[in-house]
Amino acid sequence: MNSLNVGIIGCGRAAELIYLPALQKFPGINLTAAVDTIGERRRLISDNFKNCVQYSSINSDIINEVDAAIISTPPDTHVALSSEFLKRDKYVLVEKPLALSMAGIKELIDQETSSKASLMMGFNYRYWRPVADLKERLLKNSSVDFAEIVFTGDYSKWNPVSYVSDPLDDLGPHVFDLIKFIIDEEIISVSAKSLDMKNLELNVRVSEKINIHCKVGHSAKTIRSLKIKSERENFYLTLKSARILPASGNLRTLLDLDDRIKRKLLRTTSPVKETYETQLRNFFNFVRLNKKANPGIKDGVSAILAVRAARKSINNNGKEIFLNDIN
């Protein structure tokens, strides 16, 4: 297997809690550059890898020496940093959101078009095993009648080092991408209201028949759950389980408990951490095979538009905002 030299740009919480442990599981990957303006942060990452050089900012030497880069900086820097690597035909994996606005997106798309490399979005929940199972079942056998998604999290350990986080920017892109990915349709409109400073309710329309109710927020309890009612079956996804069936009842409770006990006894990777490892594995395969990465810029843009529509709806008392009207 060909080894790859990789740089991590931004050594904040995501780098520390996600990419540091995940990268250590890939023996063919050499982390050769850790870039951050804060010396303590880049040392925290670089000290765990041989021959990893610390930098306070990116330069041509870093870009030339790596085969790919993981961009985990504040969102308003993603477009400019990605462009620098794509200009030199280097693949990039970009943490969500791709950006906070559409500024520079057209130029980024043009840059990727002329590059030999491509950009991959960090939508790791696509690799959550129950999501893959659910998508397969829906594509083969059924259509969605009702769906509810809840994404809340305890962000006491995740507060960004260098910018103020926002639940809509943090969790909204994941929710909107999951809807698009699972239902396999583009989002038409979003209506939203703020319950308080940290929690939101959203209604996402993907067709004339399908409206998906969502809750996102920063709270003391981390919840990732999806309830799906289809014409044939009901499904339930939660972080505590790798199952989608049965959706409820004593049998589901017992099966979930059995799974948790087995994970603890076998010390297996948690379901969420597993998604990041799968995401990295796919990214490295795209780089090695010189294939166009997926999910890509188009998926990142879809999430930006949905987030902007939700924010506009909040500012307009929950009015339904159509994505075609967002720019």
Image (spheres, rainbow, N blue to C red):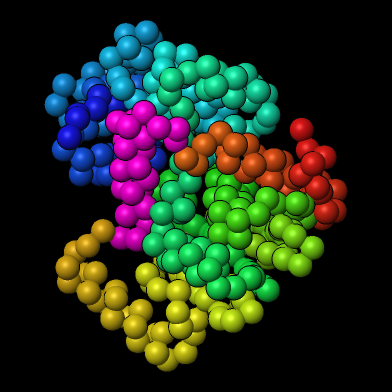
Q: Is residue 222 left or right of residue 261?
A: right
Residue 86 in percent (x, y) is at: 46, 19
Q: Residue at x 41, y 84 (%)?
A: 252
Residue 271 in percent (x, y) is at: 34, 61
Q: Which residue appears farthest toward the front when viewing the image? A: 140
Q: Does residue 175 appear in the picture of this structure?
A: no
Q: Is residue 24 left or right of residue 110?
A: left
Q: Vertically, is 181 above or below 246?
A: above
Was residue 292 drawn as part of the magenta stretch in this picture?
Answer: yes
Residue 174 in percent (x, y) is at: 54, 50
Choose top left, top right, bottom left or bottom right for residue 151: bottom right
Q: Residue at x 70, y 51 (%)?
A: 187
Q: Residue at x 37, y 45 (%)?
A: 279
Q: Residue at x 31, y 47 (%)?
A: 277
Quadrant containing the C terminus in the rendered view: top right
**Which one is nearer the viewer's eye here, 258 or 229?**
229
Quadrant containing the N terminus in the rendered view: top left
| Count of number-bearing discs | 0
Q: Vertically, is 151 above or below 247?
A: above
Was residue 131 drawn as part of the magenta stretch in this picture?
Answer: no
Choose top left, top right, bottom left or bottom right for residue 128: bottom left
Q: Which residues make up the magenta segment? A: 270-293
**Which one is nearer the viewer's eye here, 315 or 305?**
305
Q: Vertically, is 183 above or below 256?
A: above
Residue 311 in percent (x, y) is at: 73, 45
Q: Main secondary structure of the magenta part?
A: helix
**Which one is nearer the viewer's eye here, 7 or 198?**
7
Q: Which residue appears farthest toward the top when viewing the image? A: 60
Q: Does residue 247 appear in the picture of this structure?
A: yes
